[in-house]
Image: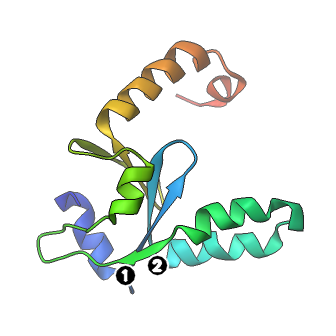
Amino acid sequence: MPTRYRDALKSTPGSLRITRHPDSCLLIFPLPAWERFRDSFGEMAIEDQWLKRFFLGHATEVDMDGTGRILVSPELRAATRIERETKLLGMGDYFELWDRPTHDAQEAQALSQRMTSEAMKKLKF
């Protein structure tokens, strides 16, 4: 975990939670954000149970060591093709952890296809 995030994470009660995301990255949540995310599944319809299984079923609890490192299970690394070089993105209440080549390829594709999307037009610069 980069230094700029460590102090904030250390002041947050509880450990971190890591789970998969369908975009081939991992989501890392401080405990309060995880609890909000987890609780949002209680409102889902029964036909959306696979989403619940995907996100909650793959979740693991981790702690940062004294130097800010976290241990990602081999199963989660394999599922998201995380090997050696990674990229960590702060996303507000949570983080995304990517295999750098996967991230860079998906980012290039997204930028080439979505720069004129409706969502982009709504942004205020």
* Element type where label 1 sits in the image: loop
Q: Residue at x 87, y 61 (%)?
A: 47
Q: Residue at x 27, y 78 (%)?
A: 10
Q: Which residue is farthest bottom?
A: 13
What x and y, as percent, mark residue 58? 53, 67
Left or right of 95, for residue 48: right
Q: Residue at x 63, y 61 (%)?
A: 54
* Location of mark 1 (residue): 15
Mark 1 vs mark 2: which is more N-terminal? 1
Which one is nearer the viewer's eye here, 121 or 117?
Answer: 117
* Location of mark 2 (residue): 31
Please, what is the three-letter code of the amino acid marked with disc 2? Leu
Q: Residues within 10 Å of mark 1 (few under 14, many from 20)?
A: some
Q: Residue at x 58, y 47 (%)?
A: 22
Left or right of 61, for residue 109: right
In the rendered structure, are the residues bearing label 1 and label 2 in contact, judged by CB atoms less than 8 Å apart?
A: yes
Q: Which residue is farthest left?
A: 67
What x and y, as percent, mark residue 81? 37, 44
Which one is nearer the viewer's eye here, 8 or 26?
Answer: 26
Q: Is residue 73 above or below residue 109?
A: below
In the picture, residue 17 is in which quadrant?
A: bottom left
Please, what is the three-letter code of the amino acid marked with disc 1? Ser
What x and y, as percent, mark residue 112? 52, 13
Left or right of 33, for residue 61: left
What x and y, as percent, mark residue 96? 42, 51
* Element type where label 2 sits in the image: helix
